[in-house]
Amino acid sequence: MFITSTLLIGLILFVYTLWRIIWPLPIRWWWKMLLCLPLGAGAFRYPLLYAVYGGRFFRPDCPMWVELLCSWLFISLIMLLGLLVVMELLLLPLRLLQRRWAFFRKLRHTLLALCAPVALLTAAWGMYQAFALPEVKEVSIHIPHLKQPVSMAMLTDLHADRYKQAEFFREVVNRTNALQADIVVITGDFEDGHLYDLAPALAPLRHLESRWGVYAVDGNHDYFSGHDAWQRYLSKLGIRFLNNEHVLPGPGHIVLAGVTDPAAVRDNCPPPDIGQALAGRPRDNTPTVLLAHQPRMAARAAAHGVQLQLSGHTHGGQTPGLRELVALFNDGLVQGLYHRQNLQIYVANGTSLWSGFPFRLFTPAEITHIHLLPENGK
């Protein structure tokens, strides 16, 4: 489905840009043919690099500069398509006025000349933001029946790869430790590659510090490159995985539960089971916090009496426009704090993101410092 969708999107980008931008240019035909080369490299970024270099469809074995260049062209085309659609809609009233046709054509050509550089520059800035270090985001959440305040440092969507190595994660660890949180939680998508390539990149996670421990669950990407080997390695770094189970960290102010990701079935691993994760939890109104990589677990969490769910997966939608599309596939849960029945769900923007689409705009990466407060507390 993803491969078919990618090819279809590439075809739309190529045909529309050729039709509306390149073909009307007052230049010789062979210049237009030359312009089709970068257009094709951007529009068909994924299948082209896979065909030429091999590897995986979404992670080809090509030089970094080639992948980044094609990603920049691909993102620029998406931005350009959006700008062209908006422009055409705004100019539609003028187009209907045939008496102003000459003025319309001149205005349209002027706007077209502006759209391309705006798209290229915006794509470059968004890619820069995609690889930027995360900032700390303070979030306060009031929890019924919570006896004492609890502070949590939340990381999610680390996506270690060849672009983000040990230096990046060492700084993430330093910023997280500076929060002096009671608990550190990581809600999945640790890596995008094999253990033998990326183990050194995530080695700084062994230095994560908190009063009551470091806990985590897997994300869907963690089942693409040797799940069991990765989980054994990360466990040796001091990270406790909650695979459909729960713990009572520290003095037991909360029940901390975690579930596997729905993608687990592709690797013959147990699917998410909230009932199993909560089996045997205290029945004394101790609040339950659930770690679930994908926010669409919320309906099941609410049915099991969970008070708070912490999730990632969406990267906050990465940019306006895409955010609304991502929300459609995640039950409307894409960024920030939501309330569903008696359940609160916090969806983080991600500490990093997948480099297959390295773009952020008005959606900064975050290390989330969550303050759990009693319902009537401050």
Image (cartoon, rainbow, N blue to C red):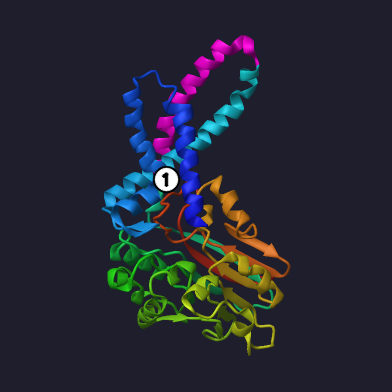
Q: Residue at x 42, y 39 (%)?
A: 76
The picture quadrant where one finds residue 178 is bottom left
**Residue that sits furthest to the right in the current view:** 341
As drawn, 165 above or below 303: above
Residue 318 in view, yes or no:
no
Q: Residue at x 57, y 54 (%)?
A: 326
As drawn, 35 above or below 41: above
**Residue that sits furthest to the bottom in the current view:** 280
111 with respect to 98 (left or right): left
Q: Position of residue 70 (x, y in %)?
A: 35, 45
Residue 338 in view, yes or no:
yes
Q: Main secondary structure of the magenta part?
A: helix
39 with respect to 369 (left or right): left
In which quadrant is the C terminus drawn?
bottom right
Q: Residue at x 40, y 63 (%)?
A: 159
**Residue that sits furthest to the top in the current view:** 99
Q: Amino acid at mark 1?
A: Gly
Q: Residue at x 60, y 55 (%)?
A: 327
Q: Which residues are magenta?
A: 97-126
Residue annotated with mark 1:
126
Q: Position of residue 301 (x, y in %)?
A: 65, 73
Helix, strand, or loop for circle 1? Answer: helix
Q: Residues within 10 Å of mark 1 (few under 14, many from 20)?
A: many
Specify whether residue 112 is painted magenta. Answer: yes
